[in-house]
């Protein structure tokens, strides 16, 4: 899931993203945010602890658009992990 805003993505040539996975969560505390799987090919979750910076040219077509609430939950989860 891309977290960064379009203006950042266009000017920097990169995006800030969190990984999406279809693998079940193994950790003892919530590191994965469940996504609305009616629009995804598999039952999927957002790996909150896996933040990446990727080149825009590596990004394929959009298959899912997260809601504002999901983005807020992802950022809140990341802040919890880093102790803010």
Image (cartoon, rainbow, N blue to C red):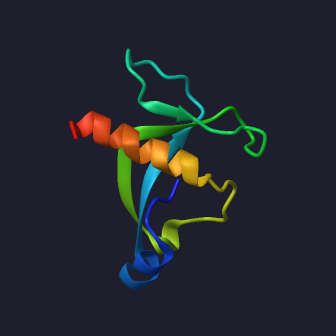
Q: Whole-percent x and y of residue 10?
A: 46, 82
Q: Which quadrant does the C terminus fall into? A: top left
Position of residue 75 relative to residue 30, above or below, is below
Query: Can I make out residue 28 in this image?
Result: yes
- What is the tally of numbered marks visible in this picture? 0
Q: Would you say residue 49 is visible in this rendering?
A: no
- Image vertical order of residue 76 relative to residue 2, above or below: above
Residue in the picture at 39% in, 84% down:
11
Q: Residue 69 or 42: which is nearer the viewer?
A: 69
In the image as oriented, which residue stretches furthest toward the left?
A: 83
> Residue 56 at what x, y percent from top left?
48, 72
- State the image quarter where residue 52 is shown: bottom left
Q: Is residue 59 above or below residue 35?
A: below
Residue 44 relative to residue 25: left or right:
right
Location of residue 81 in the rendering, given as x and y in whole percent from the top left corner: 28, 34
Q: Quadrant of residue 24?
A: top right
> Which of 5 and 50 lies nearest the eye of the viewer?
5
Q: Residue furthest bottom?
A: 11
Determine the residue located farthest toward the top in the rendered image: 28
User: Whole-percent x and y of residue 73?
Assistant: 47, 42
**Residue at the spot x=36%, y=49% of the render?**
51
Q: Who's the residue at 47% across and 48% down the image?
A: 72
Q: Is residue 68 left or right of residue 52?
A: right
Q: Name the residue rendered at 44%, 18% in the picture.
A: 26
Figure check: 7 above or below 36: below
């Amino acid at each position: 899931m891309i977290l960064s805003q379009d203006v950042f993505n266009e000017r920097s040539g990169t995006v800030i993203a969190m990984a999406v996975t279809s693998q079940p969560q193994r950790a003892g505390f919530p590191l994965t945010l469940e996504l609305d799987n009616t629009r995804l090919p598999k039952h999927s979750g957002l790996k909150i602890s896996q933040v990446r910076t990727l080149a825009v040219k590596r990004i394929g077509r959009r298959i899912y658009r997260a809601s504002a609430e999901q983005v807020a939950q992802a950022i809140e989860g990341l802040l919890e992990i880093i102790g803010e």
